[in-house]
Image: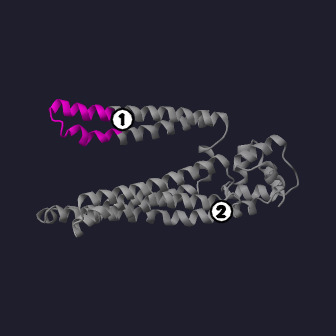
Amino acid sequence: MSFGENLQFYRAREGMTQEELAERLAVSRQSVSKWESNTSFPEMEKLMILCSLFHTDLDTLVRGDAQALCQEDTLGYDRHMNAFSNAVAGGVGLILLGIAAALGLYGLAGMPDTWCGAVILTAIAVAVAILVVAGMNHDRYVQQHPILPPIYTPAQRETYARRFPYLIALPIAAILIGVVWLILLASWAEAGGDRREAALVSGFLLDLALSVSVLVWAGMRMEKYEIENWNREHDPSPEAKARRKKIDRICGTIMLVATALFLAVGFGGMALANDYGSSIGWRWGWIVYPIAGVLCALVSHLLDDGDEAE
């Protein structure tokens, strides 16, 4: 493909008009039109801006085949992200499935407590192994490919965008339905003793495990199509690295403070109540963690917005 064809392809992928691209480059629309028709050629400064704008390299933009490169996915990004999302969703779901299986075996088959604990620990161990391997593979891929070219067509992105609301709404509906039946059957289960209660909770956790797995999987698949977010998040420039380190330090401090508060509330509640068997602090102190998570997300958003404004 010629430079003009590559430029036209990249511009169309981003949904930009010639006027919008001309405004980004501080040139006239006629200049962009001439570039795309190969009747003139931009200066090197404009070429570098185009490379940055479309997340591509100079050789591909000037004389490569941008369309073939994007559609072929020579870096294996799609395959990697599919495997990563499957592993994370499966690992998260397996932990809940292990607890559901243990409670179900206790409630329906009368399995001893020690065996139930073994089932839960086995599920957690396998899930952790899956998540660790997936995380290490993902980190290695990020280091090898911090910047990616656009590989998805607008049609591909639109196809998944139409499915995404159903993949979010249906699991949420399933969780809410599970909560309703859990409440409705609570008295019936309580009347039948611990085993019936365990069987009821097992059924709810099974519903929760499947629903949460689908939500995690759908969210990660949606994020897969956001190549611009990937490039911004893993930008190898010194400024971006410094920003990420700053965010990590702040968020690490927030989580350490949250842990200190959780321990202080828990042990403090036990001391105040003079009851070292239980404490309201342990039952409610966990709320500091979601608050800390929200603060970390807010810090990341504010720092990213600040850098973009500059």
Dominant SS of magenta comes to helix
Q: Characterize the local packing of mark 1: few (<14), some (14-19) or many (20 or more) Cα atoms within 10 angstroms.
A: some
What amino acid type should be assigned to the residue bearing mark 1? Thr
The chosen color scheme is one colour
| Badge count | 2
x, y percent for residue 124: 39, 55
Q: CA distance from mark 2 to mark 1?
A: 44 Å
Mark sitting on residue 153:
2
User: Dividing the image into 4 quarters, which one contains the C terminus?
Assistant: top right
Q: Is residue 280 magenta?
A: yes
In the rendered image, is residue 74 in sight?
Answer: yes
Classify residue 112 by image quadrant.
bottom left
Q: Is residue 233 magenta?
A: no
Q: Viewer-proximal residue, 189 or 183? A: 189
Q: Which residue is mark 1?
A: 259
Classify residue 287 by image quadrant.
top left
What amino acid type should be assigned to the residue bearing mark 2? Thr
x, y percent for residue 39: 88, 54
x, y percent for residue 65: 79, 60
Query: What's drawn in magenta, residue-wise?
Result: 261-288
